[in-house]
Amino acid sequence: MSLDIHLFPCLDDNYGVLVHDPASGITASIDAPDADDVRDALEEKGWKLTHILVTHHHHDHVGGILELKAETGCRVIGPKGEATKIPGIDQTVAEGDKFTLGSAEVDVIETPGHTLGHITYVIPSAKVAFAGDTLFALGCGRIFEGTPEMMHASLRKLAALPGDTAVYCGHEYTLSNGKFALRIEPENAALQMRMKEIESLRAAGKPTLPTTIAAELATNPFLRAHVPAIKERLGMTGAPDWQVFAEIRERKNKG
Ligand SMILES: [Zn+2]
């Protein structure tokens, strides 16, 4: 089965994503950063909004929901753990839940850390995941509500998806993430090569997404806390992976 996926910039550095199933005509917006931007994207593609799939409650992911719902009558699906914080929510989902979107089956993975109820949507048949603000290209979300151990466990769940899974994230932070990643792992040849590609994409005004799980496993320091060379560089040889992850996150927070 095939889905059409449309990625477009929203607000300052958010991304909107539309997922369209041509067979059924169903169109889902992953989050709703801004009603105007989502509406423009729908008009450009000629698609009618039927669903909004919410990853977490932050305003730059839910701000457009009520306006879009009023206009289209779309169904709003979101995390059970944050149901009270998500305007217009019709259906809550949690770890292990499955639901259908046209001809596609969607799996729900709980990925807490950035927020406590954050979820990721995976469509195995299309080999695609919508990770919100949990996993970014070459980075990960800030830990606002959870603990480093919790965020590390969430990222390990995503790391376990098939390597060729395309990952859509909530923001375009790849260039600055990559500069930080090179400080953690300057000798990583795959990372050096990827940064060259990223620099030319951004110079041309193009998005660096989607990424893939395989690319992140090879280059994203937040998915590489288990790598002995990284532990050694941080002076943490023998430390548990999640503590190494916590140290990397702390260094990134300091800029
Ligand atoms: Zn967020």
Image: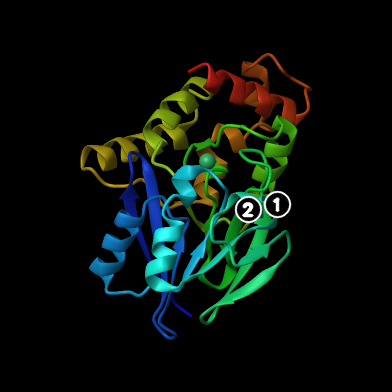
Where residue 79 sits in the image (x, y, percent)?
A: 64, 56
The residue depicted at 61 percent of the width and 32 percent of the height is 144
Left or right relative to 54: residue 11: left
Where residue 117 sits in the image (x, y, percent)?
A: 67, 48
Mark 1 or 2: the one toward you: 1
Contact (Cβ within 8 Å) of mark 1 with mark 2? yes
Q: Which mark is residue 183?
A: none
Q: Is residue 227 above or below residue 69?
A: above
Q: Secondary structure at mark 2?
A: strand
Residue that extends furthest to the left in the rendered view of this protein: 204
Q: Quadrant of residue 80?
A: bottom right
Residue that extends furthest to the bottom in the rendered view of this protein: 23
Q: Secondary structure at mark 1?
A: helix
Does label 2 point to a residue whose CB lies under 8 Å from ligand 1? Answer: no
Q: Quadrant of residue 236?
A: top right
The residue depicted at 27 percent of the width and 74 percent of the height is 46
Residue type highlighted by circle 1: Gly
Residue identifier under label 2: 119
Whole-angstrom CA distance, mark 1 to mark 2, is 9 Å
Residue 239 visible in the displayed image: yes
Residue that extends furthest to the top in the rendered view of this protein: 235
User: Toward the viewer: 143 or 233?
Assistant: 143
Where residue 244 sits in the image (x, y, percent)?
A: 69, 25
Mark 1: few/some/many CA within 10 Å (<14, 14-19, 20+): some
Where residue 186 sits in the image (x, y, percent)?
A: 48, 23
Q: Is residue 7 above or below residue 26?
A: above
Q: Quadrant of residue 226?
A: top right
Dot 1 or dot 2, earlier in sequence: 1
Residue type highlighted by circle 2: Ile
Residue identifier under label 1: 81
Q: Is residue 80 above or below residue 9?
A: below
